[in-house]
Amino acid sequence: MTQLRIAVIVGSTREGRVGDRLAHWFVEQATRHDDLAVTVVDLTEYDFPATYPAEPTASIRAFVREVGRADAFVVVTPEYNHSFPAPLKQAIDYAYDEWQAKPVGFVSYGCRSTGQHAVDQLRTVFTALHAMTVRDVVGIDLLADEPTAQCTDELQRDVGVLLDQLRWWGLALRDGRAARPYVS
């Protein structure tokens, strides 16, 4: 069986962010599974324009290709002011058909809320794009301790549950898209 291709999207572009460390921590957990091919898609590596251009730039095309290649996604997002970062929304909007009929999971972080408000808003965005968001989330409270040191039994369990849900939905939807193209 072909490996399920999961793109882990780092949703923060702020200097001093922890999202990149959390993404790499999550990738370490996910790559322990032979049936998953995991890549990191870090928004800081794309030179997106400040305004939406009439024609896609090379960076936009490269990002859209990464989204198109993936069978499933994990969005690593902070919570800023009860929502998710503007650069993440900009990136999401550059792709459209590429998100359709694919599952999306979340690793979120924040202060006390563990990023839940950001996830709630992202669920609405991805639903509008005809993507399937999975139920369970890996949520990290930045006030608890060093984020990458929080590898507790509960956090490990959360990662396992998220990967199980992504695996199930990712394989089911990949098979579905192969048998019958998705129409929105």
Image: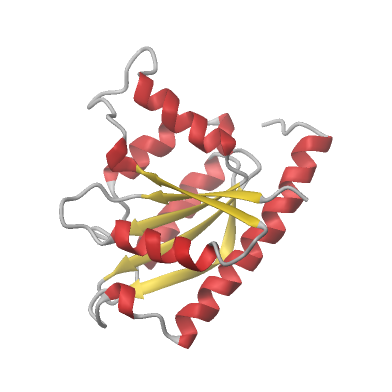
Q: Is residue 38 left or right of residue 89?
A: right
The image quadrant where one finds the C terminus is: top right
Q: In this view, does 179 lie to the left or right of 75?
A: right
Which residue appears at 28% of the width and 77% of the height?
112
- Identify the residue at the far bottom of this view: 153
Residue 164 rendering spot, x and y as whole percentages: 65, 67
Q: In this view, does 35 lie to the left or right of 69?
A: right
Figure label count = 0
Residue 48 rendering spot, x and y as whole percentages: 29, 29
Which residue appears at 30% of the width and 38% of the height?
45
- Identify the residue at the far top of this view: 54
Residue 157 rendering spot, x and y as whole percentages: 54, 80
Q: In which quarter of the image is residue 61?
A: top left
Residue 85 rendering spot, x and y as whole percentages: 28, 49
Check the image and report above or below for 162 versus 129. Answer: below
Q: Which colour scheme is used?
A: secondary structure
Check the image and report above or below for 115 versus 51. Answer: below
Q: In this view, does 87 lie to the left or right of 152?
A: left
Which residue appears at 34% of the width and 50% of the height?
11
- Identify the residue at the far left of this view: 15
Check the image and report above or below for 110 versus 74. Answer: below
Q: In which quarter of the image is residue 110?
A: bottom left
Which one is in front, 63 or 121? 63
Which residue appears at 61% of the width and 38% of the height?
100
